[in-house]
Image (cartoon, coloured by chain):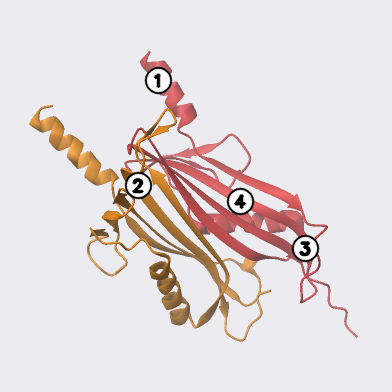
Amino acid sequence: MKAVVMCLAAVLLDGCATVVRVEAESCSPLVDGAVPVKTVQVMNTNWRLLSFMPLASGDPENPNRCTCLWFRNTVTLQSQLDMLAEEIRRAGATRAVRVTSDVNKERALFFLFLREKMRTSAMLVRDPVKVEP
Amino acid sequence: MSAKTAAMALAAAMLALDGCFTVEEASTSALGRGVKKHVMVENYGWYLFGCVPIVCGNENLASWCPFSLFCDEVKMPIAYSKLEELAEREGCKIADLHIDDDNEVLFNAYYVTIPWVVVCKDVSISANLVETGGGGK
């Protein structure tokens, strides 16, 4: 019984890092001529005990996979931007614009466990290539 | 309930019903030219019946105590003023402002909510700090 409970806890109280990508072909170019490539939302979640002790967090180096990091907190603004930078490299974009972030907290078993979710969304754009006269 | 159990429950409640005022800053070359940092200011705290403050994060970040007891500091203007202070200190302007607030009821079992007995209020603001005179968009 204890083993079942431990396994259930390990499965349920995990963290997850995900990246959602949407094509931005229908978006008009920006004022400075940069062309939208993709709209992305980067999300990372973690579980904490009593609001401060980290139990599990998503792995920002391997988003969209069934991996998590135990007893570490990776839900930080810097890790969100690092995932965004990797998405820029993957999409062949130059930079990210309109970067916004928010954080959401949920509590389970009254206040024993805290689940924190941080989301960062941005539009990835490609700057026009400057042609030498 | 014995005195020891009650004391442990009270200690756990004090540990869990906390508040926290955070100012997170991050930077990367992915933000492009002119954008110095991406920042997020957040504060959360617990309120009785949704209006009587119990505990929240201390807006005075230099203080030794991270909490403020019985103070209503989970407010948008307070969080925004911290963002303005940071922008002024960095010599930047604020762009791409995004504001979010959330309320969570503590006692919520089997989709039957005891309405608004103890509520956690959360306010967060994210923005990009753009160097003055530079273009970030």
Of helix, strand and loop, which one carries label 2?
A: strand
Quarter assignment of residue A95 = bottom right
Q: Are marks 3 and 2 on the same chain?
A: no
Mark 4 residue type = Val
Q: Is residue B31 above or below residue B118?
A: below
Of helix, strand and loop, which one carries label 4?
A: strand
Colour chain A is painted in = red
Q: Which residue is mark 2?
A: B119
Disc 2 and disc 1 in contact, CB within 8 angstroms: no
- Chain letter of disc 1 in the image: A
Any part of residue B26 in sight: no
Of helix, strand and loop, which one carries label 3?
A: strand
Mark 3 residue type = Pro
Q: Which residue is mark 3?
A: A36
For marks 4 and 3 on the same chain, the one whose residue lies earlier in the sequence? 3
Q: Are marks 2 and 4 on the same chain?
A: no
CA gap between label 3 and label 2 equals 41 Å
The label nearer to you, 3 versus 2, is 2
Please tell me which residue is depicted at 26% across the width and 61% down the height of the picture: B71
CA gap between label 4 and label 3 equals 17 Å
